[in-house]
Image (cartoon, rainbow, N blue to C red):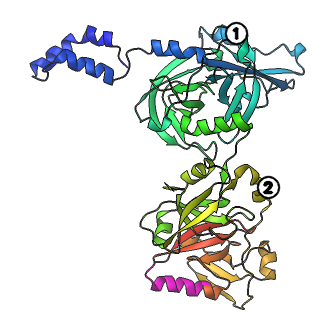
Amino acid sequence: MIPTKILRATRVAPVAALIALGGLASTPAILTQQAHAQGPASVADLAERLAGAVVNISTSRSADGSGSGRVPLPKLPEGSPLQEFFDDFFQDEPESERGPRQAQSLGSGFVIDAEEGIVVTNNHVISGADEIVVNFTDGGKLDAELLGVDTKTDLAVLKVDASQRDLQEVSFGDSDGMRIGDWVMAIGNPFGLGGTVTVGIVSARNREIGSGPYDDFIQTDAAINRGNSGGPLFNMEGEVIGINTAIISPTGGSIGIGFSIPSALAIKVVDQLREFGETRRGWLGVRIQEVTDEIAESLGMEKAMGAMVSGVIEGGPVDDGSIQPGDVIVEFDGQTVDNVRELPRIVAESPVGKEVNVTVVRKGEEQTVSVTLGRLEDSEKLASAETGEDESANDGEAVSSAAVLGMHMAALDDQIREQFDISADVNGVVITKVDDASVAAGKGVTAGDVIVEIAQSTVSTPKEALDRLEELKGQGRRNALLMLASKSGELRFVTLRMD
């Protein structure tokens, strides 16, 4: 980012070179346009306008004498001028004074409603706190009440007494409108140094970092360090388009890879926490997995897209058979589902109790079914209590065994169930052995897995499994889609190459 005044001071030599080459017609105008295209010459006015709405969050909680709850001492370069500051700020108490005490931590946040005193931050900033204090840039501070938290998105909403002081607020912007390369600015509290401003660009979007089921982070190279958590990421209009949450760093300091929760996701969570003190997400009641190219080919789909249903939660919204294991959800409530990551977010953002249309690919044909959504927060007990899918009973047809594609199969009887510790709720054809280096072994199939379906047709004997595979070969299919059940009944799909 090059200030305009520097361009003016150093433009004579480059201009002369360009003129000698016949490359410029109107040099001053072009240089001015380039300066603006490269980014703002200064963000001082913007930072000054926004800084008052960004706050430091300090918390305290009970901790034992080990000091495990205290903020760790940052590693600074030898001879750093800030060493004395950090020693004073982070120094442990003398051994003689150790005992039950209050552990301190610092993070960032921002005011979104000055009249109501609403502050947004990260859940991990205030998690386990006995006391939360909001510190302002002018040195003032107010005790904060916790309105609600959401661990799945790592967001928390606080409330302070707005009658005690004049507050400055900022508003959320449109994170969906941000493009890679757009300028952004972070303000926060790195290492306890309040009111720190850093500038960078949007480096990437839709990042998944494994922090939760709704990962959809904005990646930025604006410096984010310890203590920036919960602080805002602004666009150049001064709107909050992200909430700084995580960094990738081997040292604990910024290496230019930081992640922010996009405002499009945060707004709905914050609104629910303000209104209800908790989240109320839509719930479909299915387990899903990725649709690979092989699965798409085996189902006759033109391309891999959507989310494959690997199981239906008993007692959930679609336990009536409207959606079945093996269905591929390609559209939900008018929104196209491009991949498996998108569906949980789309469903969660839908209102509880809403009736929606869901388009699925079932046995090669698209169907649209109507579903009334449940509430995700009410689903955990059902999901954890479920031990397997309710399949039809085994007809007990006597077939000895068979082997195909590296899998040795047998009928599922009481002796086999006991041998492999297979739940009574699981029915199908048991795999007793998998040959090394076989196509099945390469897909993670192991002895004790149970084949429930092949190409969306149930099988209960080794002969039925062989006949179904031969039928697929006769249709010119190159891949076979198998629904496998684990010993406890958890379902998954694998595709096996048959040629």
Is residue 212 or residue 79 the one in the foreground?
A: 212
Does the image show residue 201? yes
**Looking at the rendering, in which quadrant would you find the N terminus?**
top left
Q: What is the x, y in percent for residue 26?
A: 15, 18
- How many dots with numbers? 2
* Place of residue 84 in the rendered image (x, y in percent of width and height, measured from the top left): 67, 8
**Foreground of the two, 166 or 51:** 166
| Residue segment shown in magenta | 465-477
- In the picture, the disc for residue 3 is none
Q: Quick one: 477 or 132, which is closer to the camera? A: 132
Q: What residue does disc 2 label?
A: 381
The secondary element bearing badge 1 is classed as loop
Q: In percent of the image, x 76 and y 52: which residue is there?
A: 378
User: Could you say whether the residue bearing mark 2 is in a helix, strand or loop?
Assistant: helix
Q: Residue at x 69, y 79 (%)?
A: 428
Q: Main SS of the magenta segment?
A: helix
Q: Is residue 471 magenta?
A: yes
Given the current orientation, which residue lies at the most extreme bottom position? 398
Residue with the mark numbered 1: 140
In the rendered image, which quarter is residue 426 located in? bottom right
